[in-house]
Amino acid sequence: MKKIFPVLYVLISACYFNAAFGQAVATVNRPIDSATWAKQTIQFTTRVIKIHSNLKALPGMYFLRGKAHADLKQYQDAIQDLSSAILTNPQLLDAYWERGLCYEKTKNYQCALNDYKKALSFVKDNPMQVAVLNTNIAIVNRHLKHIEQAIKSDSIAIAAEPGYTAAYTNRAELYMVTGKYQLAIEDLTTTLNSKNTKQFFSMILSNRADAKRMLKKYKDAINDYSYAIELAPGNKLAYWNRAAAYNKNGDYQLANDDYSKAIIFYKGDNKNLSRLYDDRALMEMGLQQYKKAIADDSLAISLDNQFAAAYWNKANAHAQNGDYQLGIDGYTKTINFYQKENRALAQLYNDIASEEYFLNEYQKVIDAGTSAILLDDQSWSPYLNRGRAYLKNNNKGLALNDFNKILTLDTTKQSFEYAYALFYTGSAEKAIAVMQSSLLTTTNGSLLMTHYYNLACLFSLMNRPDEANSYLKKCMDGGYSKKYALADSDLDNIRNTPEFKDMIGGK
């Protein structure tokens, strides 16, 4: 963040400059571009420093040359000159401030913090300078991951100068980082009362919408995004995030429209474009449009072949589409990106185990499930996959050990894994009750289809075909892949019923 240097100091320097160089300085005072001004300033101040090494204005010359180097982004040269200015005049406020900015640009955040604090000691009677410096200190503290100290500095800035919008916007970002979304909304709302450009208000509205979206206030967020776009039609991030809000609110066509608009804005920006396609793929997954999701994630990977999430999500789409081996291949490829992340690796091995189960490769299920458990023994899902595979291999004792482990680990007592563990340990009615309870509390459409499917499987395993077919029809009508029903041995007890054959096309 740049500061405005005191007018008096600049005038004094300019007067000396003119006296020293006469007509040459008059050239500098003409309207020229900043780069040319900076280069000429370096030339002139270098001559002054060389000729007048004992000059009283020498600290000012070092400062001006340092400032010029900074304007040219020659930060190391700037730091050297500004340090010389401070050495010849330790009371030179502007030199500490400008050197702090240079240290910040070179990511030497601790030195920047020291200089800003030193500069702050000179300006205690100037509320605006106190506010600006404290906001600079907050920014540096954020880089140093001292988040609470950063929030405190922004709060001091606001107390010193309540109209200083930069402190509010910066503190709002810090509140977002710490999950204090309502406080972020309050700070951003305050800045909307200031006088500023349409682009600025568009940015603030977008940020406020982000906070509302995190609070699941999707309609309010959509209103803010829409106003942000009205103020600045080029606000591409507002289109992207409004798409996410529409998706969460169940407005899928509107979400798709916004993703398509955002994609146009990001043409040429392969990294962001890759993430946009992946986001749209996630929405398509929620709509059970698995082939579209696979196509979008394929595009995401072609744009950024190091984007690990796209590989994982593409594998998920193949799995949900009933392309079990393609899913396994995708998960196996994704493993390469997560070699140092045990929990992610555990999930990937568990995903592989789930797909191998549909291929009746029960020993591979056991092997993959064991790998997952060795990486993360507190996740209950691998125990279910391995336990069911043990049953298929007639290892009932090992299977019961895994099912009982789930009952111990899952303290929520609400997951479908917990329900299956209840069933396999002899509490079938309790298992059904858990799954039906989940139906009542689930608003996510995709998850609801999964609950319907799991209930169908449980009722089939209990040899209750009417209930099984009823729930299976609900998830099939919602777009669930028929390939699952064809391959899943849990549904063997209803496979020959007329209702089942009708649902899957008479096969």
Image (cartoon, helix red, strand yellow):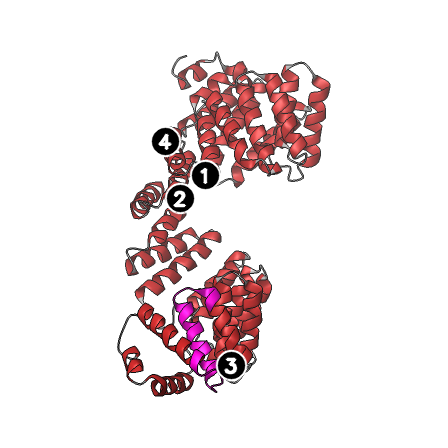
Judge the density around disc 4: few (<14), some (14-19), many (≥20) Cα neighbours within 10 Å: some
> Which amino acid does the dot numbered 1 rest on?
Phe
Quadrant of the image occupied by residue 413: top right
Residue under label 4: 295
Q: Earlier in the sequence, mark 2 or mark 3?
A: 3
Task: Give the crowd class for mark 2: few <14, some 14-19, many >=20 residues within 10 Å.
Answer: some
* Dominant secondary structure of the residues highlighted in magenta in the image: helix
Magenta residue check for 65: yes
Residue 324 is marked as none
- Which label lies toward us, 2 or 3? 3
Q: Where residue 287 appears, x then y in whole percent?
A: 40, 35
Residue 269 higher or lower than 72, as above or below? above
Nearer to us of marks 3 and 1 is: 3
The residue under label 1 is 307
Tell me the residue that label 3 is attached to.
92
Where disc 2 sits, the SS reads: helix
Which type of secondary structure does the marked residue at label 3 adopt? loop
Hey, what amino acid is under mark 3? Answer: Leu
SS at mark 4?
A: helix
